[in-house]
Image (cartoon, rainbow, N blue to C red):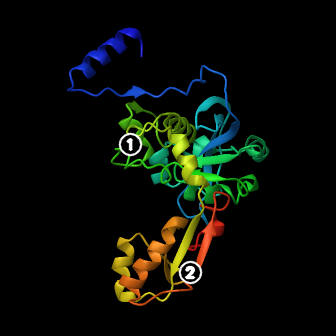
Amino acid sequence: MSQPLDSIAAVLEGTGDYRVLRRLEPLADHPEAPDEPTFIGLVVDVETTGTDFATDEVIELGILKFEYGASGRIYRLLDTLNQLHQPSKPIPPEITRLTGISDADVAGQKIDDAAVARIAADAAVIIAHNASFDRQMCEPRWPVFRDKNWGCSCHQIPWRAEGHEGMKLGYLLTDCGFFHRGHRAIDDCHALLALLARPLQLSGTLALAALLETARKPTVRLWAEGAPKELKDLLKARRYRWSPTRRTWYVDLDEAQIEIEHGYLAERIYRRPVTGLPSDRFTARDRFSSRTNPDL
């Protein structure tokens, strides 16, 4: 905003009757040089022809490469990639309505695979706001993403505990007093990077620091094999999901929760002591990948 408009916005906000949303600007470099070990991170977002991992295609890829410290402080933006890609079939009308990307926009366009490999080569972590979707869309096309650590800014930051009612990117940005052009890959990347750089509103912890702390912890997928069918509502209420491939309910937990969960299953589901339930252990290196998705 210009100075006069900033003054008007301040007056409106000062009444307590108005909230003013400001257009999001790209994150500025931190004014001080790092005084801690630093690493390379990527924020990634894709726009696609749909949500089917087997048949749908990426039509836009956005990447922001940034330097961050061990504290979670973001120091500077290093590189940007934003490219369109013509899919093998026409873009569905509902995708054009959502993203604004038309067949004319992508005609003759191709994402530079070599450029993607270069920008991602030295990344310590890759972050997306729905990493389960973005990772599974990216890995088949760009192998460089397969052996990287991934973090999910939607589900690995405690937004609700920090006072936010929703976790969608646009909602979180609005809650922080900003707006942006949503559903375009690079704009969503800039929005996410801005959120990661901010302290959370209750704890004051940097959002990136909170994400990294969660992402570093191993998780365990516990399979409730042989659980009685009539108790599925209890399992669903406890956030179990159904795997059509294995025909079994499962839940993803922190390692510290496993003993508690065994106790719950013994008391409420199996009505007997339970031992030997199958489980899988995941880290940021394989979490959110199609390699760990039982629904494929």
Q: Quadrant of residue 291?
A: bottom right
Is residue 40 or residue 106 the one in the foreground?
40
**Residue 93: where, in percent of width, then height?**
47, 52
Can see residue 254? no
- The structure residue drawn at horizontal position 52% and vertical position 79%, both measured from the top left corner, is 223
Q: Which residue is mark 1?
A: 171
Helix, strand or loop at mark 2: loop
Location of residue 21 with respect to 202 vertically, above or below: above
Q: Is residue 261 left or right of residue 147?
A: left
Q: Quadrant of the N terminus?
A: top left
**Residue 171: where, in percent of width, then height?**
38, 42
Q: Is residue 244 left or right of residue 172?
A: right
**Mark before the other along the chain sequence, 2 or 1:** 1
Q: Bin the neighbour count of mark 2 within 10 Å (Cα to Cα): few under 14, some 14-19, many 20 and up.
A: few
Location of residue 281 with respect to 229 vertically, above or below: above
Q: Quadrant of the C terminus?
A: bottom right
Is residue 185 or residue 56 the one in the foreground?
185
- The structure residue drawn at horizontal position 48% and vertical position 54%, both measured from the top left corner, is 155
Give me the C-alpha separation between circle 2 and circle 1.
34 Å
- The structure residue drawn at horizontal position 75% and vertical position 56%, both measured from the top left corner, is 143
Q: Quadrant of residue 35?
A: top right
**Residue 265: where, in percent of width, then height?**
42, 81
Location of residue 127 with respect to 38 vertically, above or below: below
Q: Which residue is mark 2?
A: 245
Q: Quadrant of residue 276?
A: bottom right
Under mark 1, the amino acid is Tyr
Helix, strand or loop at mark 1: helix
